[in-house]
Amino acid sequence: MNFKIIGTGRACPACVKTNDDLTEFLDTSDEWIRTRTGIEERHVMQDGESISQLAVQAARAALENAETDPSELDFVICSTIRGDYITPSMACIVARDLGVRCMAFDLNAACSGFIYALDCAAGYFERGRAKKGLIVSAEAMSKMVDWQDRATCVLFGDAAGAAVLELGDNVLASQLSSNGNVDALNIPHVYGNSPFSHDDAQPSYLHMDGHEVYKFAVNAMATGLAETIQAAGLEQSQIDHVLPHQANMRIIQSAMKKLSIPHDRYRININRYGNTSSACIPVLLDELNQAGKLERGQILALTAFGGGLTNGAMVLRW
C-alpha cells in the first residue's frame, strides 16, 4: 500500500506582473519573453506577504477539498527552496497555523520537490506510519532572482500548491535521481558575520547556465518519464494527463517530441504563472481538479527537473 490523492489546493499572490510590466525596468519585450519561454505573466509577492502564508492558504484549500480536518494528519511535508526562515522549517509553521502537532519537515529538491515529497510520503504509508498526510510545495522565486538579469528574472513567479494524501495503492511507479551539477544552477547561501571567516560572499541570487540546464531538462524529463511509465507496466498511449514542470515551453515541446504520448494530453499553464519551481505541478494539478478534468481511474504522469541537478517522475492513478 502507498497512497491516493484525495484533495488539492493552491494559492498565489494577488499581484500579477505581465511581460509588458517588466519592460519598464528591463531591456526586453513581451514578444521576446513569450516566443522563447511561453510566459505571459506571473504572480509576485509584495510587502506584507510571506511564502509561509501562501503555503498555509494552499494547505487549507487542499484540506477543504479533501473534506479532511487537520487533526487527521499524520505528517506535513513541505517542498521549498527557501522558506521564510532557515529554521524553523516552513512545514512547522504550516502545522502550527493548522493547529496540529504531527511530524513536519521541509524537503529541498528544487523544482523536482513535489515529486520527491510524494515519493517520500509513500514510504510512511507503506511502513504503516501514516493514514493521512499533507504535501505543500511553496516557492518565493521573486525573492531569489536578480531583477537586473533579464535572462533569468523573467522566467519565475511565486505560488503554493498542496495535496492531501491517504492510504491507498494509486502510485504505480516513481523514479528520482540527481547528478550533482552545481555550476548549471545555484543560489549561494546567505553568509553570516563570523570574525573567523573572511570568504567573499556572492550575492544570494539565482545563477543559471541556460544552455546546460536546457540540455539536461529535455533529456531528464523525456527519459525519466518513459522509464517510469514502463516500470508501471503501461504503454505511453495509456497516459491520460501529463503534468510537466512548467519551466519553459520550449523545453516541454522538445521533451514531447522524444515521447509517443499524444500531444493533446500535456497540461500547460506556464503562460499564467511562469516557473514557480516545486509549486508548478501541484498548482497545475489543482487547476485540473477544480475544473473537473480529472476522472476517477485516469492515469497521470508527473515529470520535473530542477537545481541539483535533480529530476523526478511519477505515474499514479487518480
Image (cartoon, helix red, strand yellow):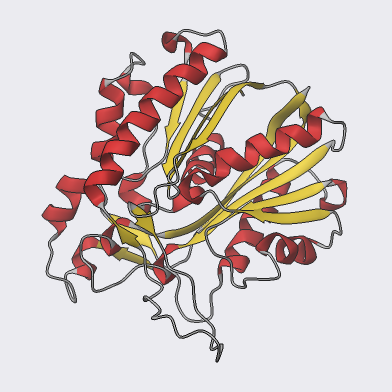
Whether residue 132 is situated above or below residue 238 in the rendered picture: below
Residue 89: percent from left, percent from top: 68, 64
Q: Quadrant of residue 98?
A: bottom right
Residue sitting at x 72%, y 46%:
134
Which image quarter holds the N terminus? top right
Whether residue 58 is situated above or below residue 201 in the rendered picture: above
In the image, is 316 to the left or to the right of 99?
A: left
| Count of labels in the image | 0
Residue sitting at x 30%, y 24%:
256
Pick the residue in front: 241 or 256.
256
Residue 170: percent from left, percent from top: 68, 22
In the image, is 69 to the left or to the right of 14?
A: right
Residue 32: percent from left, percent from top: 12, 54
Whether residue 203 is situated above or below residue 104 in the rendered picture: below
| Residue 52 visible to an observer of this rendering | yes
Which image quarter holds the C terminus? top right
In the image, is 16 to the left or to the right of 289?
A: left
Q: Quadrant of residue 51?
A: bottom right
Pick the residue in front: 122 or 200.
200
Q: Residue pushed farthest front?
A: 196
Residue sitting at x 35%, y 67%:
145
| Residue 316 visible to an observer of this rendering | no
Residue 180: percent from left, percent from top: 45, 46
In the image, is 120 to the left or to the right of 314?
A: right
Whether residue 203 is situated above or below residue 3 in the rendered picture: below
